[in-house]
Amino acid sequence: MNEEFLTVFRILGVYGDGNGTFGTNEELIARMRADTGYQNEERAFMEMVLTTVNRGVAEQLLSLLHSTARYVSDLIRGDVPVLVSRDDIVQMAAGATSRESDALRLGRSVERAIRNQVAVQSERHAEQLLSQIQELFNSAATGFVPPSGKLLNTDGIAARTGLAVKTVRRLCNEGKIDADKTGGGEWRTTEDRLQNSHYFKRRRNGNGAELE
């Protein structure tokens, strides 16, 4: 796996050996090719870092390599490489005593990988769809006018009349808006009662401006 390590080392762009010695990435790689002991030390250190403190970098690198392989496969119209789960790799490498052949285990592993990918994409699609539905309901609710028999709450009265909520509460308390007070201190009324309230009748009689 030494060549694979050197490839990862080159991609990560490491410019120092941790001991105060710095150089270009290619110079360090050339030194590691010439000095097996130095390469083993650097590889052990890099593997420790990628396994622990920089595991996120390793995962990003894996994703990058996979997406790059897919891009090149599409480019040359070649086969797309498949990432087999780690558990399946370990099982096949260990030569598990199973009647299943390696090819069959590989096939089932690929099937599980595809199913998982489809499930993740479906979940994301469902989340996006729910978000769009929620936005649709929110936008519809903003300009929604209920039928005359349906109840309007305090906020609904304010939205329907263009008045501030505190003004609606004051007018209801004064009896100028025909509404009923709930146990929670809110107000409820219908479209018909609202239109026939003293406050709006007076407005219509005074300036002819009717509620739209």
Image (spheres, rainbow, N blue to C red):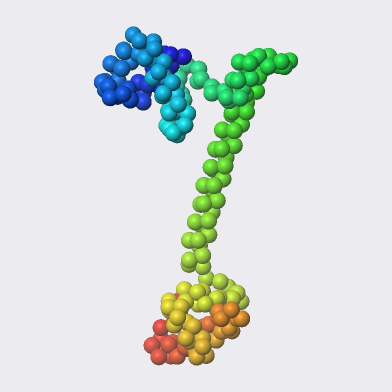
Q: Residue at x 50, y 91 (%)?
A: 174
The one nearer the camera, 7 or 65, is 7
Image location (x, y in percent) of residue 133: 54, 54
Q: Which quadrant of the figure has residue 48?
A: top left
* Residue at screen point 31% across, 13% down: 31
| Towards the viewer: 169 or 179 | 169
- The quarter in which the C terminus is drawn is bottom left
**In the depicted structure, whether residue 26 falls above or below residue 117:** above
Kindly give the residue lying farthest to the left in the view shown.
23
Q: 127 or 108: nearer the eye?
A: 108
Instruction: Work out whether residue 189 can be spotted.
Output: no
The one nearer the camera, 40 or 186, is 40
Number of numbered discs visible in the structure rendering: 0
Q: Is residue 129 above or below residue 50?
A: below
64 in relation to 178, above or below = above
Give percent across and percent down for residue 171. 48, 87
Residue ID at (43%, 79%): 163
Instruction: Identify the residue at image location x=59%, y=84%.
Output: 180
The part of the image, by quadrant, that contains residue 57 is top left
